[in-house]
Image (tube, rainbow, N blue to C red):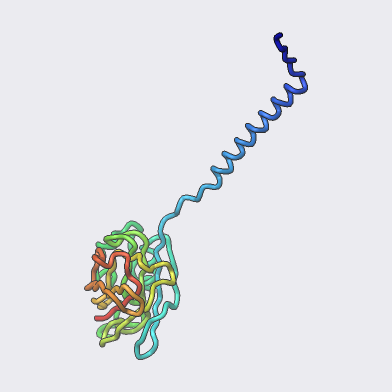
Amino acid sequence: MAVIHPKPHGHHARLRLLIAAVAATVALVGTAVTATAAPPTPVGGQHCAVELTQPEGGGQATIASETCFSTFAEALEYSTGGRVKVSADVDPASLTSEVVGVPQADGPGGAAVLARWTLGWDWKGLNYTGESRTYYVDGANPPCANGVVWTLGGVLDAGWNNVIRSAQGWSGCNHFMHYDLANQQGAVQPCVPNCPNMGAMDKRTTSLKWFQ
């Protein structure tokens, strides 16, 4: 004997349609939530000017301040006290000691005025590209003159540990040393004064040292 199934009543049909509509809405909402939860696109790198000070008589320097900008040109202008102005698209490799320069003498034959001196800069990319960090100091004399040595025991404070890929020394600090370990220990890469790449010390620098 054949079994005859009763047709669904109108109430049951409407209920099934409602359930299907709710399921479709939930799926749509889930898709929208997934799209908005995606991480934001990273923005451009930063270029920072770092002021160093050291105890009288020498010793490990400390970071007195760090001011960051969207372009290297702005960081360079700040780190030289406004003395050096270059275009925003300047190629750092094209800069010379005459451009980065030294503070003006106080009149003909006079002593240099108190001004900002650029010790050097580090880069997160090869050939002076990517994010940068320009170190500067205030003083009347070139920072590495008369046997003065500058050291920075660690660069961990701003995420610069094990990321440096190129570097340059300035203001007569012709030896810009990059060490593998803190407090000038371990393997070293000397930049005399330029390092378009760090060789075996690529992305390994933890501490720094400058001298004439």
Q: Position of residue 171 (x, y in %)?
A: 28, 76
Q: In which quarter of the image is the C terminus?
A: bottom left
Q: Where is residue 183 in the image (x, y as percent from the top left)?
A: 35, 80
Is residue 43 something one can see in this rendering? yes
* Residue 170 in sight in this render: no
Kindly indicate the quadrant of the structure image that contains residue 205: bottom left
Residue 184 location (% of width, % of height): 32, 79
Q: In which quarter of the image is residue 210?
A: bottom left
Q: Residue drawn at (75%, 23%), measured in percent from left and top?
A: 12
Of 42 and 37, which appears nearest the observer? Answer: 37
x 27%, y 73%: residue: 169
Q: Which residue lies furthest to the bottom in this view?
A: 57
Q: Vertical placement of 162 versus 104: above or below?
A: above
Specify the quadrant of the image occupied by residue 141: bottom left
Q: Is 147 positioned to the left or the right of 156 in the image?
A: left
- Residue most toward the left? 192
